[in-house]
Amino acid sequence: MNDTFTRFESPVGSVHAGHGDIHNYHSYTTGSFAQQTADRSPRRIADDQLRLLRQRFVAPKGMGEARRLLAEHSTVFLDGPQGSGRTAAARVLLYELPQGDGIFRELLPGGDEEVALTDAGLVGAGDRLLLDLAEADLAGWRKNRRDLSALRKAVQEQQAHLVVVMPQDGMLESDLQLYRAEISQPPAQEVFRRHLRLHHIPHEDYLQSAPAFTDFLDAQRSMEEIADFADRVRRARTAHRPPDTFGGWCEQARDARKTWRQEVARLVADRREASQRALLFTTAMLHGAHADVIHHAAALLLRTLKAPRDTVHLLEGKDLAERLTEISASAGPDGHVRFDKLGFDAAVRVHFWDHMPDLRARLSAWADRTAELVDRHLTADLRRELVRRLADQYLRTGKWRELAALADEWSADPANPARPAAAIHALSCGLESKQYGGNFRELILTWCRDKQLAGDLADVLLRVCTEVIAPTHPDQAVVRLHHLARRERGATPALDALCDLVATSSRLRRHMLDRLTRHASAPSADARLFLRICDPVPLTDPGGSPRALMDENYVQDCVTTGWREVFVQLPQPHWYPYARRWLHTASDAGGRRDLLLDLLVDAAGRNGIHLAALYSVARASEPTASGGSACGVATTDRLLQKISAAQGLRPTTASPRPAPPRGTTP
């Protein structure tokens, strides 16, 4: 089995955050992993998502009390009616906190890979934690509620912050009631206008009278429904359909709430020619695309379905404008094609997918081939949207495994960069699905650990781990990147990404040291990874924490165990530069110098060969010590004293320098 990978050309980046499901869309470009992700760390991605959410957020009643409780007690339990935006409010509360050394993350209690809420290592210093139990059933809430006091204590000890979103009608123990804040839905019209402003609709437009919007608000609407209505207004404005006024846009947005199922069914029944139905489906999948793209993609669909070619002369056949009229669509002044009714495209996609199941595989193949078309009007955004619309049909009908298999197929062909890009988009849609996100995370774990990494699959997995999983579930990303890094030969993009991720949190570095030394299943590979993760500089830098990781007894044990495996598993030329960095850090570590040297000597034990190799590295490293050669010599002398003690020898004092350990060459 081919279980290694050495290349990464890649891929991606932007994110969107808002009410409801979060969709991250990525663009595929060439270049090294380091170049593409230098400014797109998981921490920055998470903060960008929260920032975008904050821009469209309208504070509900009770938000001030929630802020006060979080600031004074480091914990707040958010309660409120369904649809009041509790989860969005929780994220904004955490975003508004001062940015320290901790990271934002979502807790997943009860998951296969998540530790219990009572686990001492769950909370990192300064972390911003979201525990979203809004959808928890009574049994799930009761189970997690028992552990909330212990979790809150850990949060206080680590100077972290925790926001818990309570389920509807959830009850709290009396000792936790003090930290409960109830929010109510913010003014619907203000929320609506905030979204319109973010859609760049001028205020003079949306201040006009709009009876359709008033009718929409007559029913109690959730924050997600209001956001969706605002987006439909945006799309109506873009389409330029009459009446082209704010009131008209709201009417179209209101009407778009219709399913249009009967209208679509009648249209499909009346248009029986293959060319008509091909154009209908193509327009739905590429809605808003330029007419040239629609024309070529419809012809491609006919070829994919092996439909008979039209024998009518080109000059005698119907032109595109007439053909679009037949399917209730037209091209606007900008040349882009849209249906005459807002939301009609979604209904067409659903109809074809649900009522022509035998065509699903071929429709997927067509989408793949369409994404590869060379056309200046076929933009990266349009390719992403095409994949998303296809993925929505798979997920809507519960075919998440088939979507994953399609992404796997696209990843296996590195010849065209559009295919790995499509695989990234498809997996991202799956990961961001409320219903199937956990299934995709579990599948990606299996792929990272066991699957043959053919074609660009390793690159695709690396990207979704760092860009999609890591910003909200860093612990799970660490596990998956660890499996990928174990399988690397030559270039180390997965290991580089893993190091970048653990650099965002002392807790993640501790977690990774534990995996590499206490639960290692591949000693040689893990010893190689250990040298990168066990960097003495961040280990001895407390940052904003009360103490450095190196001051913890457990971390010291992990370091000793890890270096012991390094000496056994790896040749000296491999670990030489890491030991040199360790000794240089010891020279500058002041009071921790002896600790750093002790850990190395303890790892070598009484093995004369390993001790001699350490001494040799120390002698060679003296001239490059940051404090000068004299500082390097002092560190070497101190190391030799510890080596002598480990060997049961008394250091010599007659010589200007202590004698080297047995087995070394002075």
Image (cartoon, helix red, strand yellow):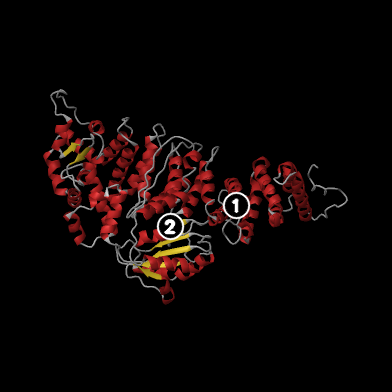
Badge 1 element: helix
Foreground of the two, 350 or 360:
350
Splitting the image into 4 quarters, where does residue 65 fall? bottom left
Q: Name the amino acid type tagged 1.
A: Pro
Residue receiving disc 1: 538
The crowding category of the residue bearing disc 1, from other C-alpha atoms within 10 Å (few below 14, some 14 to 19, many at least 20), is some
Rendered location of residue 133, percent (x, y) = 37, 64
Rendered location of residue 576, percent (x, y) = 67, 43
Identify the residue shown where x is 35% and y is 37%: 380
Do we see residue 40 in this rendering?
yes
Foreground of the two, 371 or 115:
371
Q: Is residue 607 left or right of residue 299?
A: right
Tell me the distance, in whole angstroms, between the alpha carbons under discs 2 and 1: 25 Å
Q: Name the amino acid type tagged 2.
A: Tyr
The crowding category of the residue bearing disc 2, from other C-alpha atoms within 10 Å (few below 14, some 14 to 19, many at least 20), is many
Residue placed farthest to the front in the image? 204
Foreground of the two, 436 or 259:
259
Which quadrant would the C terminus be assigned to in this image?
Answer: top right
Q: Is residue 255 left or right of residue 553?
A: left
Do we see residue 602 in this rendering?
no
Residue receiving disc 2: 95
Q: Is residue 52 above or below residue 36?
A: below
Q: Is residue 297 above or below residue 208?
A: above
Q: Is residue 393 left or right of residue 515?
A: left
Badge 2 element: helix
Q: Is residue 602 left or right of residue 259?
A: right
